[in-house]
Image (cartoon, grey):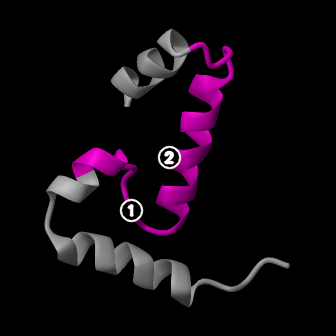
């Protein structure tokens, strides 16, 4: 995750990049997962992606 923070900073995203990644990590943990960057997730087994999509579909809607 640290690499993603540095890449965001290099891309000119403001100092809140680290805060944003902390929130993403927290959301993943609340759903029972470790935060994984999209590229790493895409290189992993499709079953991991499907499990995460199912968790989104099973969570209550926020309206």
Residue 17 falls in image quadrant: top right
Query: In the shown orientation, is residue 47 left or right of residue 8?
Result: left
According to the image, label 1 marks what residue? 33
Q: Which mark is residue 7?
A: none
Residue visible at 52% across and 16% down? 11
Q: Is residue 22 placed above or below 7 in the rendered structure?
A: below
Q: Is residue 62 placed above or below 13 in the rendered structure?
A: below
Q: Residue 9 lies in magenta, yes or no?
A: no
Local secondary structure at mark 1: loop
Residue visible at 35% across and 45% down? 37
Q: Nearer the viewer, residue 40 or 33?
A: 40
Give the percent coordinates (x, y) of residue 5: 47, 22
Check disc 1: other Cα within 10 Å, few if <14, some if 14-19, many if 20+.
some
Which portion, as a residue range, is magenta? 12-40
- Mark 2 or mark 1: whose residue is earlier in sequence: 2
- The Cα–Cα distance between marks 2 and 1, rounded to whole angstroms, is 9 Å
Query: In the shown orientation, is residue 49 left or right of residue 4?
Result: left
Q: Is residue 2 placed above or below 10 in the rendered structure?
A: below
Give the percent coordinates (x, y) of residue 16: 68, 22
């Amino acid at each position: 995750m640290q690499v993603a923070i540095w890449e965001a900073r290099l891309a000119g995203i403001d100092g809140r990049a680290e805060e944003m990644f902390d929130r993403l990590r927290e959301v993943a943990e609340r759903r029972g997962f470790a935060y994984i960057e999209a590229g790493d997730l895409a290189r992993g087994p499709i079953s991991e992606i499907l499990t995460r999509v199912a968790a989104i579909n099973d969570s209550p809607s926020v309206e």
